[in-house]
Image (cartoon, helix red, strand yellow):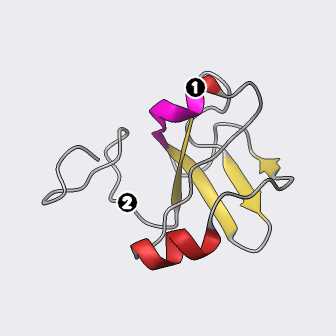
Amino acid sequence: SENPDNPITSTGKIPSSLWCAVDPAKIEYGTLIYVPNYGFTTAGDTGGALRSYSKYQVDLYFDTFDEAVEWGRQYVEITIYNWGKYGY
């Protein structure tokens, strides 16, 4: 989100593990996604850096910087459910 004092995703959601960032040209908003060792999340934000990657990629939410660093960058096989239909 642009304003750290009032964080809102590009689709108007409050950031949480319920929402992940995607390239909406590749994964439609509202798509339910399962990420191994993370759980279910829904495409609900735009990740500008994700547009340069040719495959499907998601940017996950973590409550703290330390949690994000601990997770790091991982290449895992995600499962997509209900393309563009969940949470909207």
Residue 80 in view in this figure: yes
Say which element carries label 2: loop
Place of residue 2 in the rendered image (x, y in percent of width and height, measured from the top left): 22, 43
Farthest residue to the left: give it. 5
Left or right: 6, with 31 as reference point: left
Residue 23 in view in this figure: no
Is 49 magenta? The answer is yes
Q: Are marks 2 and 1 in contact (CB under 8 Å)?
A: no
**Quadrant hosting residue 72:** bottom right
Residue beneath label 2, please?
A: 15
Q: What's the residue at 66%, 33% (across, down)?
A: 27
| Residue 46 drawn above or below residue 66 | above
Residue 51 — which label? 1
Left or right: 42, with 8 as reference point: right
Segment tinted magenta in the rendering: 45-51
Is 9 magenta? The answer is no
Instruction: Look at label 2 and name its amino acid.
Output: Pro
Place of residue 20 in the rendered image (x, y in percent of width and height, measured from the top left): 54, 52
Q: What's the residue at 68%, 28% (across, down)?
A: 53
| Residue toward you, 69 or 62 | 69
- How dense is the environment of label 1, judged by Cα within 10 Å: few (below 14), some, or many (20 and up)? some
Q: What's the residue at 31%, 45% (across, down)?
A: 12
Q: Nearer the viewer, mark 2 or mark 1?
A: 1
| Residue 49 drawn above or below residue 2 | above
Say which element carries label 1: helix
| Residue 7 drawn above or below residue 21 | below
Instruction: Look at label 1 and name its amino acid.
Output: Arg
Q: What's the residue at 73%, 58% (across, down)?
A: 74
Left or right: 20, with 12 as reference point: right
